[in-house]
Amino acid sequence: MDGFMDRIAQKFGSAGEVIKANSEAEARTLKESKERIKALEASVEEMKRLSLKCAEINELTTQLAKGAIERLEDAGSASGVSTEEISTLTEAMDGLKAQMEESFKNQEENVHKENVRVYRNVQASIVEELKQQSEAIAAEHRRMEKKVRGTKPIAIIALVFGGVSMVGIIAQLLISLNIISF
């Protein structure tokens, strides 16, 4: 009976070590995933900051262009420059302003596309990590199930022998107490 218990203890002892090693590997993988996610989140935050900065610069440039147009109009009326020249300069400034606004819109679109790309990469990374962890857990579960399946018949046989032994002990007790006689 001791040999049987030793074999069971040996199998479960090694399984415990395997489970511990597997848990440590999963913890390392989880830590690496969290570090990657933090790095990607930092990138997203940096992109948000740059996007806000671009919007501020766009606003300042628009105000600067408006101020320049007003100054040109004021200078033109004060110096006797014709309204035709002023309107030509104003149209040129408006064209530059439109080009700048278009450039900023393109930058905003590019930043948005980059943000979406990073988000999708983070999402794909998390899904991939979860899939790998699920597969590892399922594989470990199948392996442990196989080990347990091997010990089940032995445990059932031991239980049957234990039951037979218990019946024998009870019968001896009843015979020794003269409750049953042969």
Image: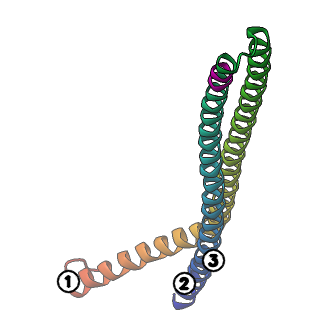
In this view, the residue in front, 143 or 5, is 143
Sequence order check: which comes first, mark 1 or mark 3? 3
Point out residue 52 in the picture as x, y percentages from the top left corner.
Answer: 59, 41
CA separation in Å, label 1 and label 2:
41 Å
Q: Earlier in the sequence, mark 1 or mark 2?
A: 2
Mark 3 highlights which residue?
21
In the rendered image of this protein, does residue 27 appear above or below residue 172?
above
In this rendered view, identify the residue nearer to me: 123 or 161. Answer: 123
Between the C-alphas of marks 1 and 3, the distance is 58 Å
Residue bearing the label numbered 1: 178
Q: Which residue is mark 2?
A: 9
Front-lying residue, 45 or 137: 45
Please state the horizontal and vertical placement of residue 73, each as a whole percent of the image. 66, 19
Camera-near label (2 vs 3) is 3
Amino acid type at circle 2 is Ala
* Magenta residues, start to end: 70-75
* Residue found 65% across the figure and 59% down from its top: 39
